Image: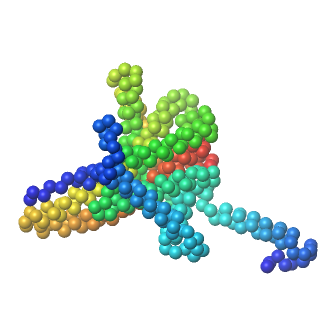
């Protein structure tokens, strides 16, 4: 095909054609890699997927908070059950769960943890 | 007037084949299990049979299967990077399972499997156990870096580490409760609004108002289809995000 001008110089068919093929494969690979949406999701993630990604995030907000409180409550109950410290484990861990719920919401909404999540993405 | 419809009745499990008893608990093949098998059948049909032709120009079903696959592959790639590929089968299976079960639930008179907390919690446990087991096997104690946020001053770690631990433990809860609550609430709302139509029609002159809840029911149905797809997507995305923790702990 397009390998004609260089292929005639070095010899019959085989080796130059082979080199040409691998060069083209490599070029194709770099082109494909360039097109793949990889490590730049930060602006793309907010914009292009549009409704669905943002709706999904909105759906996350409420349950993230509730889940934090529930997790704290379960942990507090188990702690009291195991160590017999009747009200105190529940009180402390429920408050910790409450804080965790707020922290979760802040992280999802990009209020504080945006940096952490972006770091992870860039690191990967 | 004596019509009273229980909006919860649709979620009752009905044993189809009894497999015996353990203690006082009946072990039965319920309609829930039947729906799950049906969902697996549909997914297998879509992904194996429809793509068996392997045509370069895909037909309708093959195009659908390829679109779904590409969609999830992109999501996983964005969340976890190149080495997250090994988890693609897990994420794709979970996505398809949840999606098909959600859509099954939208068929009139069908049973919504994902409206049961134990089912969604089981799925969430699969995800979290994968994260923990893979993370510990790959990184050993270094996996505990998940609990240490980066760029936080030392004294603050005393507060942040317990918060991160509770946050980690809340993940399976939020993952399962979100899916279950959305499906359950949606189906109950649909049932109640649809029942309003009947009630108004029975109540004589009030029947003039019956188109209002009917319109709302139609709108809610559309919303429920959106929620069904969206919740499957959110489940898959979060699975990928959590798996990224197993691959790269200590962000």
Residue B81 visible here: no
Q: Position of residue A78 (x, y in %)?
A: 39, 28
User: Could you tell whether A12 is left or right of A30 in the image?
Assistant: right
Using the image, determine if residue A7 lies above or below residue B33: below
Q: Given the current orientation, which residue lies at the most extreme top position?
A: A84
Residue at 10 percent across and 64 percent down: it is B202
User: Looking at the image, which is closer to me, A104 or B22?
Assistant: B22
Residue B60 visible here: yes
Q: Position of residue B5 (x, y in %)?
A: 18, 55
Q: Given the current orientation, which residue lies at the most extreme right position?
A: A10
Q: Position of residue B236 (x, y in %)?
A: 48, 53
Using the image, determine if residue A109 lies above or below residue A15: above
User: Could you tell whether B217 is left or right of A31 in the image?
Assistant: left
Image quadrant in which you'd find residue B103: bottom left
Q: Quadrant of the C terminus of chain B?
A: top right
User: Could you tell whether B218 is left or right of B210 in the image?
Assistant: right
Residue at 22 percent across and 57 percent down: it is B192
Residue at 87 percent across and 75 percent down: it is A13
Residue at 40 percent across and 48 percent down: it is B120
Q: Quadrant of the N terminus of chain B?
A: bottom left
């Amino acid at each position: 095909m397009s390998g004609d001008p260089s292929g005639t110089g070095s010899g019959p068919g085989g080796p130059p054609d082979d080199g040409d093929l691998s060069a083209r494969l490599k070029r194709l690979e770099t082109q494909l890699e360039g097109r793949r949406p990889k490590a730049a999701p930060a602006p793309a993630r907010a914009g292009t997927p549009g409704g669905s990604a943002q709706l999904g995030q909105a759906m996350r907000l409420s349950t993230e908070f509730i889940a934090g409180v529930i997790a704290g409550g379960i942990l507090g109950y188990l702690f009291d059950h195991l160590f017999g410290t009747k009200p105190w484990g529940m009180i402390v861990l429920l408050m910790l769960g409450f804080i965790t719920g707020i922290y979760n919401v802040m992280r999802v909404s990009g209020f504080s943890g945006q940096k952490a999540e972006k770091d992870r993405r860039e690191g990967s | 007037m004596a019509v009273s419809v229980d909006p919860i009745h649709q979620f009752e499990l009905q044993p189809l084949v009894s497999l015996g008893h353990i203690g006082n608990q009946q072990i039965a093949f319920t309609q829930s299990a039947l729906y799950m098998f049906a969902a697996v059948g549909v997914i297998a049909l879509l992904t194996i049979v429809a793509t068996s032709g392997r045509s370069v120009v895909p037909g309708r079903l093959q195009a659908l299967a390829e679109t779904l696959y590409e969609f999830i592959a992109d999501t996983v790639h964005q969340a976890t990077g190149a080495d997250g590929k090994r988890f693609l089968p897990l994420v794709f299976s979970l996505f398809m399972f949840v999606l098909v079960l959600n859509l099954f639930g939208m068929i009139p008179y069908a049973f919504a499997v994902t409206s049961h907390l134990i089912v969604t919690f089981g799925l969430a446990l699969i995800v979290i156990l994968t994260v923990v087991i893979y993370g510990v096997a790959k990184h050993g104690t270094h996996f505990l870096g998940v609990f240490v946020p980066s760029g936080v001053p030392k004294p603050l770690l005393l507060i942040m580490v317990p918060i991160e631990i509770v946050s980690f433990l809340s993940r399976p809860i939020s993952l399962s409760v979100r899916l279950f609550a959305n499906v359950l609430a949606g189906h109950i709302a649909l049932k109640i609004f649809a029942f309003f139509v009947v009630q108004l029609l029975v109540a004589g002159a009030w029947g003039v108002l019956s188109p209002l809840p009917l319109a709302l029911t139609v709108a809610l149905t559309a919303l429920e289809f959106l929620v069904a797809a969206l919740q499957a997507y959110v489940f898959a995305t979060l699975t990928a995000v959590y798996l990224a923790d197993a691959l790269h702990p200590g962000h």
